[in-house]
Image (cartoon, rainbow, N blue to C red):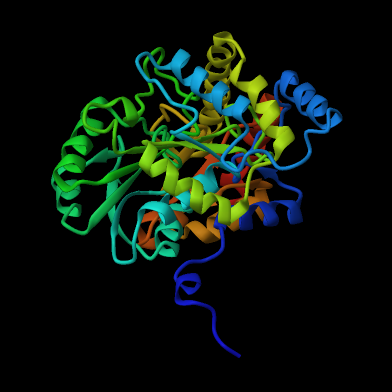
């Protein structure tokens, strides 16, 4: 029997989804996979049902229903002063942000190109580069602030660099890329003629007040070289809908649309109709979202601190990357994560899954907090027993 391709052999299955399966097996509280356990806005459910009843059940335009693309462009303009998106030439609707990223990589990268990726990383980015035939060049975010070492970043760029992947707010650390950091990226991307692929699925989940999130597409020098990736999933609590999009200059969008067409044809038509309702939610919705997630963050972080975990308080997204040195002197993140779910009943993600050199994550685990307050309280009660189980 022939072996799998070298590309497929170069990475593992998703550790995050593996931990979800283990959590289901043991009846645990899932703080591993980042999906809400609460309802999406009722306007979205009503719009989806209305669309199905209206027989909007066949293919939409491959790169997105016109009404949805227009609604996305209008929402961007309302949210970010001075950012104008042409829905006819600069938008492609995809099957979630996951497809958006791989479509962008396949459309704009060639075999042998290099892609700068920050680690710890969201686990899809490395495989996306590899599946595109590209070579990841890794730049470490340094604790405790998850900062960029300028010399290290400069050294990662060169004549073969074709793209850099940015995720802000950042999964798994909760880091918000600063204006200075994005300015440095702009300098390097202009110097080496590099694309920016920016995953901004957590754009409204941040804890720094107005202006906390700065999209790279609004940074001087990056406007004409940025592919912005987003989706309904996290902002509107519909991770199972798989409706995302890219915003990019026309020439990049044309290439992404072609790849998207042959990857998936198109995203679900009735859910794109519901996406119009999402884009039309008032500004108060997003303000309330940030307030609610801050409460969830603080509740879980208090419980993690009491249980002995160390961490930097996340500025955005809905994850906490924890140092486990005090609760796991052996520094075995995989064993600790399995013990957490099998003995404590709380699922987390081993830190090594976010690094190419797994030893860098051996004393880390990631928790997710897009959950009801009662779910997080129950998780906190279970985590409080961690010290007792360690002594057994």
Instruction: Identify which residue is drawn at 39% across, 56% down.
Output: 355
Please determine whether, in this image, residue 294 is positioned above or below residue 197: above
Residue 271, how many percent across, how many down?
Answer: 70, 33
Left or right: 96 as drawn, with respect to 114: right
The structure residue drawn at horizontal position 21% and vertical position 42%, both measured from the top left corner, is: 189
Residue 213: image location, x then y, percent: 38, 23
Question: Looking at the image, is 319 positioned above or below residue 41?
Answer: below
The residue furthest right is 53
Q: Residue at 70% across / 21% down in the picture?
A: 41
Which residue is more in the foreground, 91 or 284?
Answer: 91
Q: Quadrant of residue 374?
A: top right
Residue 392 x/y as whole percent: 61, 56
Residue 97 in sight: yes
**Looking at the image, which is closer to me, 53 or 343?**
53
* Residue 79 placement (x, y as % from top left): 45, 16
Q: Which of 135 and 13 lies nearest the eye of the viewer?
A: 135
| 46 or 181: nearer the viewer | 46
> Is residue 122 visible in the rendered structure shown here?
no
């Amino acid at each position: 029997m022939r072996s799998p391709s070298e590309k497929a052999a170069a990475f593992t299955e998703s550790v995050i989804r593996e931990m979800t399966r283990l959590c289901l097996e043991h009846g645990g509280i899932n703080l591993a996979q980042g999906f809400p356990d609460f309802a999406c806005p009722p306007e979205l459910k009503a719009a989806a049902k209305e669309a199905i009843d209206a027989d909007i059940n066949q293919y939409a335009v491959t790169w997105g229903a016109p009404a949805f693309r227009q609604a996305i462009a209008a929402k961007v303009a309302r949210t970010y002063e001075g950012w104008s998106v042409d829905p006819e030439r600069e938008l492609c609707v995809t099957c979630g942000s996951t497809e958006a990223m791989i479509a962008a990589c396949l459309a704009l990268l060639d075999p042998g190109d290099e892609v700068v990726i920050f680690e710890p990383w969201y686990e899809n980015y490395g495989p996306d580069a590899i599946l595109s035939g590209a070579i990841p060049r890794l730049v470490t975010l340094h604790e405790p602030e998850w900062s960029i070492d300028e010399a290290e970043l400069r050294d990662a760029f060169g004549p073969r660099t074709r793209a850099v992947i940015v995720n802000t707010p950042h999964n798994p650390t909760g880091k918000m890329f600063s204006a200075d950091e994005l300015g440095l990226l702009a300098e390097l991307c202009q110097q080496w003629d590099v694309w920016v692929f920016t995953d901004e699925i957590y754009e409204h989940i941040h804890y720094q007040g107005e202006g906390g999130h700065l999209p790279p597409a609004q940074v001087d020098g990056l406007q004409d070289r940025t592919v912005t990736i987003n989706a309904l999933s996290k902002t509107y609590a519909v991770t199972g809908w798989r409706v995302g999009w890219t915003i990019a200059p026309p020439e990049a969008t044309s290439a992404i649309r072609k790849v998207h067409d042959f990857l998936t044809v198109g995203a679900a038509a009735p859910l794109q109709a519901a996406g119009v309702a999402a884009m039309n939610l008032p500004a108060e919705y997003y303000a309330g979202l940030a307030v609610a997630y801050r409460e969830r963050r603080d509740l879980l972080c208090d419980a993690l601190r009491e249980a002995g975990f160390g961490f930097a308080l996340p500025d955005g997204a809905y994850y906490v990357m924890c140092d486990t040195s005090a609760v796991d002197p052996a520094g075995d993140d995989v064993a600790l994560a399995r013990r957490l779910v099998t003995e404590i009943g709380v699922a987390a993600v081993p830190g090594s899954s976010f690094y190419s050199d797994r030893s860098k994550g051996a004393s880390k685990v990631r928790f997710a907090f897009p959950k009801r307050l009662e779910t997080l309280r129950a998780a906190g009660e279970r985590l409080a027993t961690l010290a007792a189980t360690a002594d057994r």
